[in-house]
Amino acid sequence: MSDTPIESGVPVTPTRYWHRLDDGRVQCDLCPRHCRLHEGKRGLCFVRARKDDQIVLTTYGRSSGFCIDPVEKKPLNHFLSGTPILSFGTAGCNLACKFCQNWDISKSRETDTLAAAATPEAIATAARRNGCHSVAYTYNDPVIFMEYAIDIAQACKEQNICSVAVTAGYIDEKPRELFFRYMDAANIDLKAFTEDFYYRLTGGHLQPVLDTLIYLKRETSVWFELTTLVIPGQNDSEKEFEEMTQWIVENLGPDVPIHFTAFHPDWKMRDLPPTPAATLIKAAGIARMNGIHYAYVGNVHNRHYASTWCHECGELLVERDWYVLGEWNLDEKGCCRNCGTSCAGVFLPSPGDWGARRKPVGI
């Protein structure tokens, strides 16, 4: 729970996942943190607060800025490859990661961080006007502004724009069902594979994230990929890579892509070194050996481990140099041109050509 009070005059939006406690507090039921709040107080996420004896959202319609990115930057390597995606976030987060790479947004406790204001309809229109195939709810976790994200997703659907959630998956069962009902794709941040790591370094727990992954696989049609930020000395052992990737194959199947990305010293963990590229390659190799068809490395330059290869015949399917696509050997149905094996994902008949461009936009 945050000690920061909700300011008078801040516009708020009612939410649905909360209940009153016998001791007079109100409990937020959005995520496993279950913040219990007195009147005027904010939850740990900062953006959900108690006002007039209910839990409200304090950042609806306000963003930390809008930017068009390559979809591969989310990262999504198997969803509308090569296309531009309109990306934005708000402020706050429901985890407390000591290694946060977007801490200036996710750890913000200043409402003036939210410089851009936009209605859901305006965001959908901006995405279409700029040739974007999708909108990403990212930079901070969209779970905490789910009412805003859902309204945007509905407005996007009316204009044939897809919705992508970039999230840690730390959400309770009922809101999880509602939130992902409106998402077309997601990248889930599987931060590690030990409860100790989650408890010490994120202030959360591992099992709710695994529950989200199993739910997505078994109960939805959402295309999703995984990302693990590999931190030296914290979640980079071969044993953990083995256990994580074996669990993925057994519970999610071999076709869920995983991205092992490099840590750089930031926020409250500036004393650790950046992740060696060799560690990421080792992780990807273990993943492939354990049966995962698509294992990538990120935040380092490595064409081989950034590209997609046919798991059946070994043919190069999609060449990537950072976010620039090169050789493309998928047919119009998303199958290997050499052997006909399907490449898991959501692909257009031909790739986009957005490349590595980054374009800030106004709404």
Image (spheres, rainbow, N blue to C red):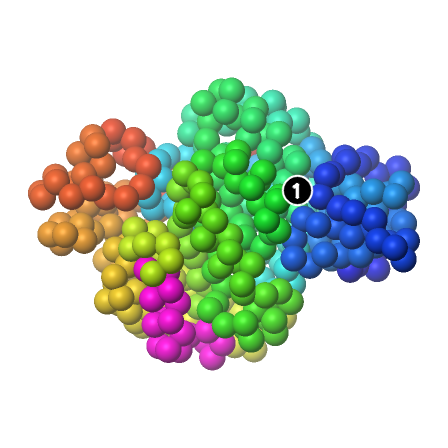
**Closest to the observer, 16 or 293:** 16
Q: Residues within 10 Å of mark 1 (few under 14, many from 20)?
A: many
Q: Position of residue 358 (x, y in %)?
A: 46, 40
Would residue 23 appear left or right of 64 to someone viewing this image?
A: right
Residue at the location (64% across, 67% down)? 203
Q: Position of residue 187 (x, y in %)?
A: 45, 49
Residue at the location (58% across, 38% down)? 178
The image quarter containing residue 296 is bottom left
The residue to which callout 1 is attached is 145
> Considering the numbered disc 1 on the image, is that residue within a helix, a strand or a loop?
helix
Location of residue 357 with respect to 272 vertically, above or below: above
In the rendered image, is residue 67 in sight?
no
Residue at the location (45% across, 53% down)? 214
Residue at the location (76% across, 35% down)? 13
Would residue 8 appear left or right of 217 to someone viewing this image?
A: right
Location of residue 110 with respect to 237 vertically, above or below: above
In the rendered image, is residue 320 in sight?
yes
**Closest to the observer, 326 or 241:** 241
Q: Which residues are magenta?
A: 231-249
Quadrant, the C terminus: top right
Quadrant, the N terminus: bottom right
Give the amino acid at mark 1: Phe
Q: Position of residue 304 (x, y in %)?
A: 23, 58
Q: Position of residue 141 (x, y in %)?
A: 59, 49
Would residue 241 appear left or right of 87 to someone viewing this image?
A: left
Task: In the displayed orientation, state which residue is furthest to the front.
Answer: 22
